Image (tube, rainbow, N blue to C red):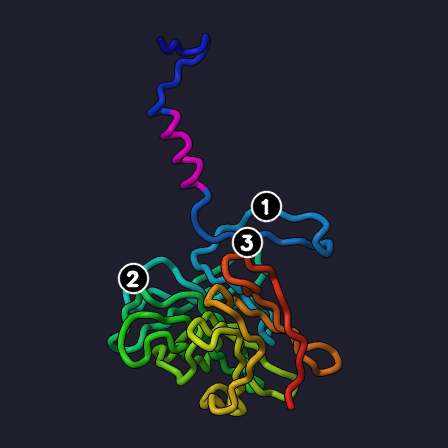
Amino acid sequence: MFRRPPGSTQSRSSAASDVYKRQNQWFGSWIRRSEDDGKTWGSYIRVETSAPHGPIELSDGRLLYVGCTGANTPEERVGVLESRDDGRTWTRIGSIAQAEGDDPSQCHEPHVAETAGGALVAMARYHGEGEFANHLRQAFSTDGGKTWTRFEPTPIWGYPPHLLRLDNGWLLVTYGRRTEPFGERACISKDDGKTWDVQSEIVLSQAPSSDLGYTASAQLGDGSILTVYYEVLEKGRKPPLRYTHWKLK
């Protein structure tokens, strides 16, 4: 016969409720700041949007965070937040609406870059159905992120995107290709995202399966590019983190 331990008066349902409350307390997206090069970290700061690559710093000193809000309406799925105090507080300043006919629940993991002229280019992962399923979506802002064009399909097949403005002003987007031939890919725009040179898509790696992606790139002092991602080396094994160190021709 089961006997409750002495001093234990909490029911099983009450304990489960407490666990749920603790879990629910931490649901969502959070930021922590360090002011000593990562040696220590400050308190948790909740933000109302989420994306794997987080915010970027703009030329005017603001931090801009484009991410998914959890809403499934075409106008509210992707939110735009800014911080004017180095990430301590965040304010919602805009939203990016979905393309006509797109299912907002299929839009995920956006990222943003600032062009040399100060405009903003955002891209997002999209699934759904139709001719442009799995093609990256793209939107533009010319007023610092307050208003945006609708997301529209690009000719780029892959996901999720990571955007980077190169030293020469070109935009670079890297992404995973999760259909054969599998691997990590990159594409260049020389006109601030208006067109992308998909005919000259750059192959950064080849992989044995679709378990890959989440690229992030940085341009180094010598002009070369370091792109980090995860990717399986062999089917059935857990994927490691990998990188490709490369240069544009």
Percent position of residue 150, x then y = 34, 78
Q: Residue at x 60, y 87 (%)?
A: 169
* Looking at the image, residue 7 lies above or below residue 248: above
Q: Amino acid at mark 3?
A: Ile
| 35 sits to left or right of 62 | right
* Looking at the image, residue 38 lies above or below residue 92: above
In the picture, which quadrant includes the C terminus?
Answer: bottom right
Task: Determine crowd level at label 2: few under 14, some 14-19, many 20+ residues with C-alpha closer than 10 A.
Answer: some
Q: Residue at x 41, y 71 (%)?
A: 125
Query: Could you say which quadrant of the image residue 158 lies in?
Result: bottom left
Q: The magenta stretch spans which residues?
A: 15-25
Q: Give how far apart the Cα atoms at labels 3 and 2 are.
A: 23 Å
Query: Could you say which quadrant of the image residue 86 lies in?
Result: bottom right
Q: Nearer the viewer, residue 8 or 114?
A: 8
Mark 1: secondary structure: loop
Q: Earlier in the sequence, mark 3 or mark 2?
A: 3
Q: Amino acid at mark 1?
A: Ser
Q: Residue at x 38, y 60 (%)?
A: 69
Does 3 lie within the magenta span? Answer: no
Q: Which residue is mark 2?
A: 72
* Looking at the image, residue 72 lies above or below residue 168: above
Q: Which residue is mark 3?
A: 31
Q: Nearer the viewer, residue 67 or 204?
A: 204
Dominant secondary structure of the residues highlighted in magenta in the image: helix
Q: Which residue is mark 1?
A: 43
Q: Are marks 2 and 1 in contact (CB under 8 Å)?
A: no
Mark seen at residue 99:
none
Mark 3: secondary structure: strand
Percent position of residue 180, x then y = 44, 76
Q: Is residue 83 visible?
A: no
